Image (cartoon, coloured by chain):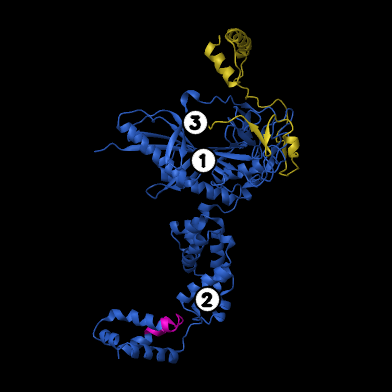
Amino acid sequence: MAQEYEVIIGMEVHAQLLTRSKMFCSCSADYVDAPPNTHVCPVCMALPGALPVINKAAVEATIRTGLALNCRIASFSVFARKNYFYPDLPKGYQISQYELPLTTDGWVEIEDDAGHPKRVRIRRAHLEEDTGKLVHMDGYSLVDLNRAGVPLLEIVTEADLRSADEAYRYLRKLRTILRYLGVSTADMEKGAMRCEANLSVRPKGQKTLGTKVEIKNLNSFKAVRDAIAYEVQRQVRILEEGGTIEQVTLGWDASRGRTFVQRTKEEAHDYRYFPEPDLLPLEVSQEWVEALRETLPELPDAKMDRFVREYGLSRKEAWIVVEEQDVAQWYEAAVRAYGAPRQVYNWLTGEIFRYLNEANVPIDEIRVTPEGLAELLRLVDDGTINRNTAKSVLQEMLATGKDARTIVEEQGLAQVSDEAALASIVEEILAAHPDEVRRYRAGKKGLFGWFVGQVMRATRGKANPDLVRKLLQERLNE
Amino acid sequence: MALTREEVEHVAWLARLELSEEEIVRFQEQLSAILEYARMLEHIDISQVPPTASVLPMRNVMREDEVRPSLPRDVVLANAPEKESGYFRVPPVLEDTE
């Protein structure tokens, strides 16, 4: 039998914090649309003598995140200098945290590949600053320092992940938590959340760890999954052929779908961390922590459990509406307005999700309110329209922003429940199709649905389907 | 506690200093002497002393999260030897590949 292999993965995530100003100065941290070098001051461009001052909101966002990740909040925390030279780093060092980070020893729950709950341990979540941006030209480079000094949260797991899919699910979960907290947009495509993976492979049963490689530049969820899957395959192939894995830093080339070597061990960094002498330590009191705990929203796991309990959804179903906070809010508002959580769930995850995907808009931008959906469903309940008509009315509501009742009136979509009127239509249909009537009566009962369809078509879909079926039953079986 | 030649070269590289052969030898001696001098600190018992992060008696010096005006860009770029379209222009930075 072929040798089985075990993959050991740890993740390092950097998330930009959504503060108004930068980490250590009062320049705007909203750099995305700003012209180059317009959000820059003596502190973040590292002019001699300029001194940093800690942004309180960034510290609080870090503590709140630590609490949401079940971390211990350090009562005493220190910033440190991480020394290296790179043109996007004006000071020649990054202010980060090393020995005494703000938060440590937490966990995030995900599903493992067998679908069981699993805790991914968080080693630390600490505060640091982002670097500037480089633009590479032909023969030279350009530097924009608007991003330099934007607060960054670094979240490091223990090596608890065992597959590319687990890593993917961990990241998605982390993004959801950060967004619920409102501390980061966690938008990977825009660089607000970046990710590195440490990975090693060993034959199953072997005690010692395999050689660890680091994969950088993973800037989409797909890249994370693809790069890890590729690298596992690559390493297993090398081990199968009796080769050895080199300890290297890899990049991910998404267009070619392969990893490439960025740095070898010999060039490993030597950061010479030491306590940042320009900043004073932080003392985080229990009262401060508790006050921040009060500000936490209902977190995704708790909301999922509650949706399972209160609305009778399965965990998987609940997660589908919980993963995005705005969707969860929309769902709950619709359930409040209408009742019937299961029905609301089906409409939301069916018709409305389809529209969100096709139109590529977030739920808070659609033109149907939860109350609007409730009104539509009540029109079905009281027999004004049938289910199929309701679907097209909803499309119209999404497209025009009109309410259900207006659309039904304007387009004359009210269901025909007038028994005499429907009976005469049924007569016409039967008279027009004597062959089918004969075959049905001779035992081809499958034609019944076809008759229903004919009547629905004759009424442009407005007939009350229950009534149509009843009338057809009576006439065909007499 | 003599510093090796490789250690001197490594420290010089970290500081992006180019040392001549004569300097490497001289700094090896001088840096070793400095380390030897500092070594007397090892005789002090600090097992009960937490590592010092700051000698000032203050803690939690923070600012509120408020935006203030940044510098005008011409001032930001005033001392740049080279600039282009509002950017600092620098020698080519190779993505750390190969």
Residue A403 in percent (x, y) is at 58, 74
* Mark found first going from the N terminus, 2 or 1: 1
Write the residue at 73% across / 44% down: B67
Asked whether A463 falls inside the magenta stretch, the response is yes
> Which quadrant of the figure has residue A241?
top left
Asked whether B7 falls inside the magenta stretch, the response is no
Q: Are marks 1 and 3 on the same chain?
A: no
Q: Amino acid at mark 2?
A: Arg
Spatial CA span between label 3 and label 2: 62 Å
Residue A36 in percent (x, y) is at 67, 41
The circle drawn on residue B97 is: 3
The circle drawn on residue A166 is: none
Q: Is residue A355 above or below residue A40?
A: below
In magenta, the rendered stretch is A457-469
Give the residue pinned by disc 2. Answer: A378
Q: Is residue A222 above or below residue A402?
A: above
- Check the rendered structure and report the hue given to chain B: yellow
Residue at disc 2, secondary structure: helix
Q: Is residue A121 visible?
A: yes
Spatial CA span between label 2 and label 1: 47 Å
Q: Is residue A367 above or below residue A100?
A: below
Residue at disc 3, secondary structure: loop
Residue at disc 1, secondary structure: strand
> How many numbered marks are there?
3
Q: Is residue A109 visible?
A: no
